[in-house]
Image: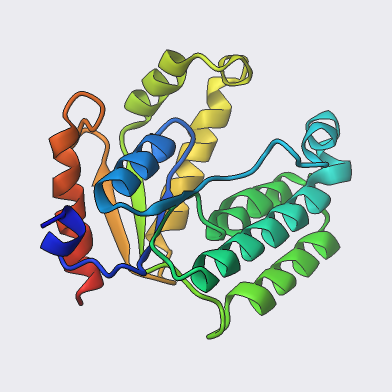
C-alpha cells in the first residue's frame, strides 16, 4: 500500500504549497509529488514578458505583471482540474492579490484605480463557486532567522543583493495573509518539524496530516 492509499488521500486531490521566499516550497512540492505519485505544477517565469520591465520600473509595470500572473495561474488551475487532479502546486493564486498586489498598492507602486480593477477581476474569476479551490493549502512557516539562513544558503545572486528589510516585510505580510486566509482548508507546517532532504521518511508525517484534513 502506498502512502496516498494509506492515509486515504483522493487520487484527484489538489494540494497547494504556500509560503515566503526561501521557506522550501519547491522542495516540499517535489517530495510530496514523489511520495503521493502526483504531478507537479510550478510557476512559469521563463516566458514572462513583463518581469524584466517590472524590475526596471515598478510603477509602470506592476499592474501588467499582476494581471499576467492572474491569467497564467487561472489557466493552470483550470488545466489541473480538467486533467483529473492529482497535483502538488508550488505557490497559490491567492498570494498574488493578498500579498503582492496589496503591497504595490500600499507602497504607491500601483495606482488606486489599477488596484481596484485588479481586485475586481480577481474576485470575478477566483472568488466564485465555479473556481476549483485546492483541497488543502499547506503553509510552510518558520522563524525569520531560519528563513534568512535558507536564502543565504541557496545563494541566488538577486536574493543576496536584496536588503534584509525587504525579506522582513515580506515575512510579515505572509504571516498577516495566512492568519486571515479562509478560502480552503489550511495545514501549517513549521520548517523545523521536518527535514525531507536528509530524512525522506519525514514526509510521511506531513502526508498523515494532509489525510486528516481532506477526510473532514
- Counting labels gives 0
Give above or below for 6 relative to 46: below
Q: Quadrant of the N terminus?
A: bottom left
Q: Quadrant of the C terminus?
A: bottom left
> What residue appears at the point 45 percent right and 71 percent down from the top-left corner?
84
Q: Quadrant of residue 19?
A: top left
Q: Quadrant of residue 141?
A: top left
Residue 93 at x, y percent in the picture: 57, 59
Residue 170: x percent and y percent?
53, 38
Identify the residue at horizontal 70%, vertical 67% (top origin). Answer: 119
Residue at image x 58%, y 45%? 43
Instruction: Tell me if residue 8 comes above or below residue 138 in the rendering.
Output: below
Pick whichever, 160 or 89, lies toward us.
89
Identity of the residue furthest to the front in this view: 1
Residue 209 drawn at (x, y percent): 17, 57
Q: Residue furthest bottom?
A: 129
The structure's colour scheme is rainbow
Percent x, y for residue 116?
76, 67
Q: Nearer the viewer, residue 162 or 72?
A: 72
Q: Nearer the viewer, residue 117 or 129?
A: 129
Q: Residue at x 85, y 35 (%)?
A: 53
On the rendered structure, is 36 left or right of 132?
Answer: left
Q: Left or right: where does residue 168 sit relative to residue 6? A: right
Amino acid at each position: 500500500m502506498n502512502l496516498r492509499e494509506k492515509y486515504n488521500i483522493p487520487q484527484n486531490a489538489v494540494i497547494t504549497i504556500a509560503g515566503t521566499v526561501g521557506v522550501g516550497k519547491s522542495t516540499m512540492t517535489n517530495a510530496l509529488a514523489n511520495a503521493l505519485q502526483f504531478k507537479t505544477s510550478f510557476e512559469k517565469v521563463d516566458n514572462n514578458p513583463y518581469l524584466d520591465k517590472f524590475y526596471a520600473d515598478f510603477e509602470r509595470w506592476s499592474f501588467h505583471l499582476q494581471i499576467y500572473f492572474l491569467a497564467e495561474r487561472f489557466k493552470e488551475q483550470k488545466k489541473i482540474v480538467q486533467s483529473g487532479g492529482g497535483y502538488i502546486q508550488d505557490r497559490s493564486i491567492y498570494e498574488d492579490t493578498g500579498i503582492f498586489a496589496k503591497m504595490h498598492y500600499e507602497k504607491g507602486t500601483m495606482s488606486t484605480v489599477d488596484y481596484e480593477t485588479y481586485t475586481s477581476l480577481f474576485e470575478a474569476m477566483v472568488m466564485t463557486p465555479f473556481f476549483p479551490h485546492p483541497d488543502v493549502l499547506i503553509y510552510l512557516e518558520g522563524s525569520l532567522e531560519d528563513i534568512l539562513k535558507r536564502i543565504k544558503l541557496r545563494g541566488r545572486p538577486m536574493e543576496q543583493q536584496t536588503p534584509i528589510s525587504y525579506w522582513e516585510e515580506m515575512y510579515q505580510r505572509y504571516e498577516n495573509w495566512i492568519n486571515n486566509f479562509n478560502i480552503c482548508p489550511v495545514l501549517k507546517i513549521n520548517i523545523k518539524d521536518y527535514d525531507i532532504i536528509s530524512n525522506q521518511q519525514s514526509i510521511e508525517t506531513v502526508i498523515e496530516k494532509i489525510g486528516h484534513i481532506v477526510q473532514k
